[in-house]
Amino acid sequence: MQSESREQILKTNLKTILILTISIVMVSLFLFRNLLFKSTYLLKSFGELSVEPEIAFTNNKPTFLEFYAEWCEVCKEMAPQVSSFKDEYEKDINFVFLNVDNQKWGTYIQKFAVNGIPQVNLFDRKGNLVSTFIGKQDEIKIRQSINNLEKEEKPYEEIINAKFSTIQENKNNEVSPRSHG
């Protein structure tokens, strides 16, 4: 009789501990969701924060154009850095974010020969391509290029880092959405 009572108490205690542990995990995930999922959230919001490309190339302001995808790990790594650039420079520079998975941007993907992401193209106020960065980049290098957009004499530079995601045409769909390679 006494052992049945002990078993009953033990089961009740185990259930209580399990419920308490699950509750703590759920509350922690809810409270820290911004920290845990910040990069993914930033990538998803880039499209909403973007200036339309047609406007950006005609409003006489320099343009920061980034090609990205929500599944791209390197894009996720760079998202906080790109977001801070946007916060710092958005009054003086257009920020255009084009998701390579959106068929709507196929013309721009072809025009700027995007075959690895993230790809950042910087344009001066006249719409001349000044710099192209492919793959994970050093914040200082991009910042220097952004600050140099106002200078008159600027040779074109292309900087490729080996850490980038390859874009390949999906053979299953004739419209050619992009997929991770």
Image: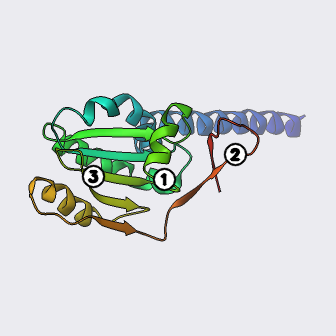
| Residue that extends furthest to the right in the rendered view of this protein | 1
Q: Residue at x 47, y 54 (%)?
A: 113
Q: What is the secondary structure assignment of the residue under circle 2?
A: loop
- Which tag, 1 or 2, sits closer to the chain's start? 1
Q: Residues within 10 Å of mark 3 (few under 14, many from 20)?
A: many
Pick the residue in front: 127 or 170: 127
Alpha carbon distance from label 1 to label 2: 15 Å
- Say few, some or many: other residues with alpha carbon within 10 Å of mark 2 (under 14 / 14 to 19 / 20 or more): some
Q: CA distance from mark 3 to mark 2?
A: 28 Å
Return the residue at label 2: 170
Q: In what quadrant of the picture does the N terminus appear?
A: top right
- Residue 83 falls in which quadrant of the image? top left
Three-letter residue code for mark 3: Leu
Q: Which mark is residue 122?
A: 3
Characterize the local packing of mark 1: few (<14), some (14-19) or many (20 or more) Cα atoms within 10 angstroms: some
| Quadrant assignment for the C terminus | bottom right
Label 2 sits on what residue type? Answer: Asn
